Image (cartoon, rainbow, N blue to C red):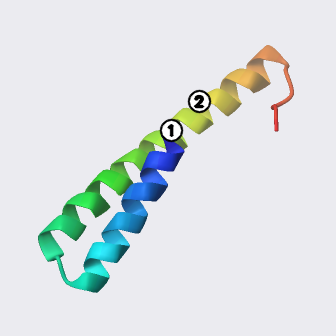
Amino acid sequence: MLRLAIALLLFSVLFAVLGFGGIAASFTGAAKLLFWVFIVLFAISAIMSVFKGRSPVI
């Protein structure tokens, strides 16, 4: 999911540079949504690992 968010961010920057405003805005919106979903899932995962007593896997 993080790869998809990064890809959408790169596409939105590319389209913004090329001047495609509507397409860039839609990709930016999708990238922002996926970014926040990733942050929330990461926070939930970190909190659950603290309560279970396991160290995070890096």
Per the image, the residue denoted by label 2 is 44
**CA distance separating discs 1 and 2:** 6 Å
Confirm whether residue 54 shows in the render: yes
Tell me which residue sits at (27%, 74%) in the image.
15
The residue sitting at the top extreme is 52
Location of residue 43 (image quadrant): top right
Residue 45 location, quadrant: top right
Q: Secondary structure at mark 2?
A: helix
Residue type for callout 2: Ile
The kind of residue on which mark 1 rests is: Val
Q: Nearer the viewer, residue 49 or 57?
A: 57
Q: Quadrant of residue 54?
A: top right
**Vertical position of residue 47 compared to residue 35: above or below:** above
Q: Please determine whether, in this image, residue 34 is positioned above or below residue 32.
A: above
Please give the name of the residue rendered at 43% of the width and 57% of the height, measured from the top-left corner: 7
Percent x, y of residue 53: 85, 19
Residue at 13% in and 69% down: 22
> Is 55 situated left or right of 3 in this image?
right
Provide residue 30's location: percent of width, then percent of height.
Answer: 30, 52
The answer to which of 12 and 55 lies nearer the viewer is 12
Instruction: Report if the CB atoms under discs 1 and 2 are less than 8 Å apart.
Output: yes
Q: Which residue is mark 1?
A: 40
Q: Residue at x 37, y 57 (%)?
A: 8
Q: Secondary structure at mark 1?
A: helix
Query: Where is the C terminus found, in terms of image quarters?
Result: top right
Of 50 and 32, nearer the camera is 32
